Image (cartoon, rainbow, N blue to C red):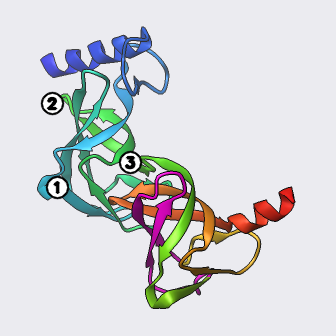
Amino acid sequence: MRQRLMFNGMLMLVVLGLGGFGLLSPTGAIGAQDGKIKGLAAGVPGGSISLAATGNPTTEFQVTFGDPAISFPVVISPATQVKIEEGTLPATLRNGDAVEVEGSITPEGKLLLDELELEDFLELEIDAIITSVPGGALTLPLAPGSPAVFVQFSLVASGTTFSMVITPETEVEGGALLLTAGTRVEFEAVLRDSEIRVIKIKSEAEDEDEHD
């Protein structure tokens, strides 16, 4: 009972505009037994678990939100519907991943999940210069079924070097693109599984030609 009251208290805080990521009932009624939380995964057993669309083993972890952070216990069951904002299932849920969860409150004061969505934690839009490509050159888009390719790039302003991941799902604007050391590109990416995963990429030479 105490945990249920704690949930209702946190719900009231958010409704009053004092909360963090958000804990809402679908009806908006304070005291309702359904809830939705958007926050960061924590306390994942072993630090990470693999999730399929359904049929996952019963697993408990926490979702944290707000500043100072509040943690709320949530439970995945075999009936939980799992979705992913970018990418395909099965996918890995790790501590620190952004999630949105929705379900009903159990007598123990936990959120039993009807739905769990893995969200993109961070979106990037970057102008960069390619510094290293496996084999010296890479033609995009990659063929369906090809393995992911790690490409080194540096930021135009600072020269700091990072690694990005290009997959067959990476969208290439403006037709086929040949990546070699020195190629200047603009790309959009998300941070998933501690990797910069490229969603869309194009040659910066096209933009320069448009301005000439």
Q: Is residue 68 left or right of residue 24?
A: left
105 lies above or below 52: above
Q: Which residue is mark 3?
A: 116
Q: Which residue is mark 1?
A: 47
Ranked by sequence position, the earlier of labels 3 and 1 is 1
Please name the residue shown 44% across and 86% down the image: 134
Which x, y percent locates residue 113? 33, 43
| Residue 81, quarter of picture | bottom left
Please name the residue shown 54% across and 57% down the image: 156
Q: Secondary structure at mark 3?
A: strand
Residue 31 visible, this orientation? no
Q: Which residue is mark 2?
A: 108
| Residue 83, quarter of picture | bottom left
Q: Is residue 191 left or right of residue 143?
A: left
Please name the residue shown 42% across and 67% down the image: 89
Amino acid identity at mark 2: Glu
Which x, y percent locates residue 157? 53, 51
Ranked by sequence position, the earlier of labels 1 and 2 is 1
Label 3 to label 1, Cα distance in Å?
Answer: 17 Å
Amino acid identity at mark 1: Gly
**Segment tinted magenta in the rendering:** 140-167
* Residue that extends furthest to the bottom in the rendered view of this protein: 135
